[in-house]
Image (cartoon, grey):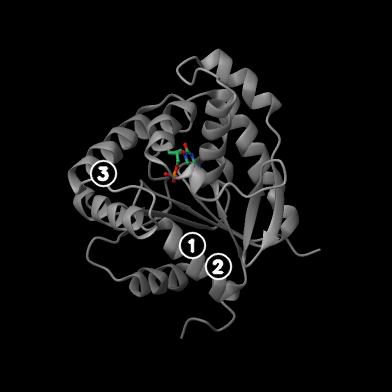
Amino acid sequence: MQQVRIIAIDGPSGSGKSSVSKLVGARLGFLHVDSGALYRIMTWQSLEHRVDTANPDAVAEFAQKLNVDFAAKDGAVVFLVDGEEPGNRIRTPEINQHASEVATVKAVRDRITGWLRGLTSFGDLIVEGRDITTAVFPDSPARFYLSASAEARAARRQKEEVEKGIANQSAEAVKASLLARDKIDSTRKYAPLKKADGAVEIDSTYLTLEQVVETVLAALPRDWTNGEVA
Ligand code: DC
């Protein structure tokens, strides 16, 4: 059997991971996996079950119990809680505020890493997150680190929140929350966000989405791109 191919993309919030991963995945026929959504689901469900997200022991215990189902749909692996996709319920400022602390808990990371590795049963994947290149799939030959200035990232996130009707925060408030999360994500003890040795770094501040997509495609192993790259 041919080995499953994994494209791994890490980077901070608003660096463009989701848009880039969806487009590259669609071009190559690799299913898109948004690993951040699993951390958001863990956070949302903890809050729904009145678990104190500031108490790592309570969160660790809850992490063992939570069940998530997986299905392939419209070019992505979707996550189901009690048979339903969570949608924008996991994209609120409240979840943003608590997700980073939930993501510091080792039992949470271990459970989600196990789920992500299991998704290879669906076939070729493009997986985005914070520790995909360093901890979840460190052996992939296609690993990328996306970055962008804090201003560019905050502006993208704010536009997205307003367009999707999730929240109406000022650009300053969005930037402050994003920087606070970056700090927790990159200084935590287990699997912090960092550029992996050997990962291709792409600074998207002044690039269009299409330019970033082309840069990723051009850096992939030749036989992965089906002639997509000239
Ligand atoms: O990408 P996002 O904003 O949806 O991620 C939500 C939170 O989960 C964020 O605090 C970072 C964390 N996360 C993580 O620790 N590891 C991942 N692989 C993906 C996300």
- Kind of residue sitting beneath label 2: Gly
On screen, residue 157 above or below 43 = below
Q: What's under tag 1, amino acid-wise?
A: Ser
Hey, which quadrant is residue 98 in on the image? top left
**Mark 2 neighbour density, 10 Å: few (under 14) some (14–19) many (20 or more):** many
Measured from the top left, where is residue 173 in percent x and y? 22, 40
Where is residue 105? Give x, y as percent: 52, 23
In the picture, the disc for residue 200 is none
Q: Quote the CA–CA distance across marks 2 and 3.
A: 28 Å
- Mark 3: is the Cβ under 8 angstroms from ligand 1? no
**Chain-order first, disc 1 or disc 3:** 1
Residue type highlighted by circle 3: Val
Label 1 within 8 A of ligand 1 by Cβ: no
Neighbourhood count class around disc 1 (C-alpha, 10 Å): few under 14, some 14–19, many 20 upward = many
Q: Classify 10 Å Cα crowding around label 3: few (below 14), some (14-19), many (20 and above).
A: many
Residue 87 in the image: above or below residue 114: below
Kindly identify the residue that appears in the image at 62 percent across and 50 percent down: 85
Q: Between tags 2 and 3, which lies in front?
A: 3
Residue at numbered disc 3:
174
Residue at the (22%, 66%) spot, across then down: 206
- The quadrant where residue 160 appears: bottom left
Q: What residue sits 48% from the left and 30% below the top?
A: 103
Q: For the residues marked 2 and 1, what is the alpha-carbon distance in whole angstroms? A: 6 Å
Point out the tag, 2 or 3, that comes first from the N-terminus. Answer: 2
Mark number displayed over residue 21: 1
Q: Tell me the residue at 60%/75% (across/down).
A: 223
User: Compared to 54, does 16 lie above or below?
Assistant: below
Q: Any mark on residue 25, and which?
A: 2
Task: Check the image and report above or below for 31 versus 175.
Answer: below
Q: Quadrant of the N terminus?
A: bottom right
